[in-house]
Image (tube, rainbow, N blue to C red):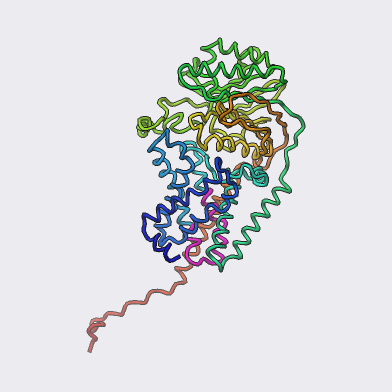
Amino acid sequence: MKTLGHWLASPWRRSVAAALAGALPVLAFPGPALWWWAWVALVPWLLLVRTAPGGRRAVYDGWCGGFGFMLAMHHWLLPNLHVFTFVLAALLGVLWAPWGWLVRRLLGGQPSARAVTAALLVLPSGWLAAELVRSWEGLGGPWGVLGASQWQVAPALRLASVGGVWLLSFLVVAVNVAVTVLVAVRRARVPAVAGLVATAAATSAAWAWSPRPDADERVAIAVVQPGVVAGADSADRRFDREEELTRRLAGRNVDLIVWGESSVGFDLDDRPDLARRLAGLSRETGAEILVNVDARRSDKPGIYKSSVLVGPDGPTGDRYDKMRLVPFGEYVPARSLLGWATSVGEAAGEDRRRGSEQVVMEAGDGLRIGPMVCFESAFPDMSRRLAADGAEVLLAQSSTSTFQHTWAPGQHASLAALRAAETGRPMVHATLTGVSAVYAADGARIGPPLGTDASTSRVYEVPLTHGTTPYVRFGDWTPRAALLILAAWAAAEGVRTVRLRRSAPPPPAPPAHTAHGSRARPGR
C-alpha cells in the first residue's frame, strides 16, 4: 500500500490512474455488456479520490475520471471526430470535478458513520446531477447514463418503470459507495451494509408492487434492414433493396412495416415516382409503411429528417420532423466558433433543421405509434411524452452505419429496452444496418435481433399493453429528489460550519499596551 501511495504521489501518474479508473464502468455497456460489473466499477475511482491529499486534487481526480469515462464511452467517434473527441471528453469530464470534491469530503480519511450515511445519499445525487447536465442535447445527450448498463436485467427494468433510468443510476452509485466503504473504512461498515440492504429492499419492493402492463392483443410489425449500401447512387440502390425486402412481406398479414433512418434519400414531393412505389408496396403487403426521409424539403427551406407514414394511396399526411439533432453529426453547435471541427473530422457541413413537436400517428386499424429518430431514443422524456399522449407502440428509426464495427450499434439498440420498460409500451428499434431489435413493454426482447451483418426483413409479434407506469405518471422525480438531497446537505453543512465557528473559543486577546510599558520593555 505504501508503494502504491508513493507511485500515486506523482501528479501525472495519479491523473493517468484516475482516467483509467473512470473508464472502467464502460465495460458494463454493450459490446462487453458485463452488466454486473457496473455495481463495483466505480470502486477503484472512489478509492483513489478519497485519498486525494487535498480538495483541489480531489477535484482534479474527478475531472480526470470523468474524462476517462466520456472518452471510453464515445471512443467509437475517434475515426470521425479525431482530436475533437478528446476535446469533448475533456469538456464533459469537468462535470465530475465537483463529484470528486464530494467524495473526498465525505469519505476521505476515516469518515464517521454519519458521514458514510450521508455519502450513500449525497454521492449518488452528485453523480445524477452530472448526468442530468450532460443529458442536455447540446452536450451530446444522455448516451452512456450509468443506469442504462442494466438494460438486460429484469429487476432493474422493473425499477426503471418506477423512476426511469435515473433511479438505476442512483442505486448503482449507492452500491459502489457502500462497497468502497466495506473495503476501505472498517469502522463504518454498519451504514454501508444498511445501504446494500436498502437497495435490495427497494428492488424487491419494485418487483412485487410496481404495476405490470396488461397485454390484451398482438400486432405484427415488420422491420426492413437493407444493410450497408455505399458508393455512387447509394440512395437509389438502398431504396431498391428496401423495396425488394418489403415485397417479401406480402401475404404475411403484417400490420405495420418500419424502415430505418434515412431510408429514403429524396423528398417524396420531388420524387413522386418513389411515392408511387411505396404506395404500391403498401397495397401488396396490406400494411402502411413508416419510412424516414432525409432530404431537402420542397415546401420549406433546409434539410430535415422526417418519419413519414405511407399507405396504399401514398403519404397519409402523418409526418414527424426530428427535433433533437446529433451535435456535430447533424449540426455544429456555435458553428461560428466551432466550425473548425469540419476540417478535422466528419462534422456536418450544413445544419439540419429541427421539428417543433412530437407526433403520435394512427396507422392501419387504429394502431397508435410514436416515432423517434436516431439518438432521440436516448432521451427518456421523449418516449414518456409519447406514451402519455396515447402511443401504443414506440418506434425508433436509426442508422449507425458509420460506426458499423464498433460498440455503438449494440449500445443504441439497448436503449430501446429501457424506454419500453420506463413507459410500459413495446418499442421497435429499426435500423438501416443493424442492430435492429424489438422489446416488449417490460423491456424483454421479442424475437432475435438483426445484427450488423444482416440484410433482411423480419416480422415480430408485438403484444400491445395498457395502463400507466409510475414513471410516465410522475416523470423525472428521481433527479428532482437528488437535487433536493444535494441542497439539503449543503444547507446542513452551512449550518454546521456556522455552529462550529460560534462554539469555537475566541482567539487570545493581545497583551494590553500602555503608555508606561510593553512586553518587550515593562514599565517601571
Quarter of the rendering occupied by the N terminus: bottom left
Can residue 378 be seen at all in this image of the molecule?
Answer: no
Question: Which residue occupies the foreground of this view, 123 or 412?
Answer: 412
Residue 327 part of the magenta segment: no
Furthest toward the right, the residue is 216
Q: Position of residue 380 (x, y in %)?
A: 58, 38
Residue at the (62%, 37%) spot, across then down: 419
Horizontal arrangement in the rendering, residue 29 relative to residue 458 (left or right) = left
Quarter of the rendering occupied by the C terminus: bottom left
Residue at the (43%, 60%) spot, across then down: 52
- The range drawn in magenta is 103-128
Taking 336 as reference, is 14 above or below it? below
Furthest toward the bottom, the residue is 524
Q: Position of residue 191 (x, y in %)?
A: 60, 63
Which of the 4 quarters of the picture holds residue 113? bottom right
Residue at the (47%, 71%) spot, across then down: 503
User: Total label count?
Assistant: 0
Horizontal arrangement in the rendering, residue 14 relative to residue 34 (left or right) = left
Can residue 524 be seen at all in this image of the molecule?
Answer: yes
Our reading of the magenta stretch's main secondary structure is: helix
Horizontal arrangement in the rendering, residue 480 relative to residue 155 (left or right) = left
Residue at the (65%, 33%) spot, across then down: 448
Taking 327 as reference, is 314 above or below it? above
Q: Position of residue 161 (x, y in %)?
A: 66, 42
Q: Position of residue 159 (x, y in %)?
A: 65, 46
Question: Which residue occupies the foreground of this view, 510 or 93?
Answer: 93
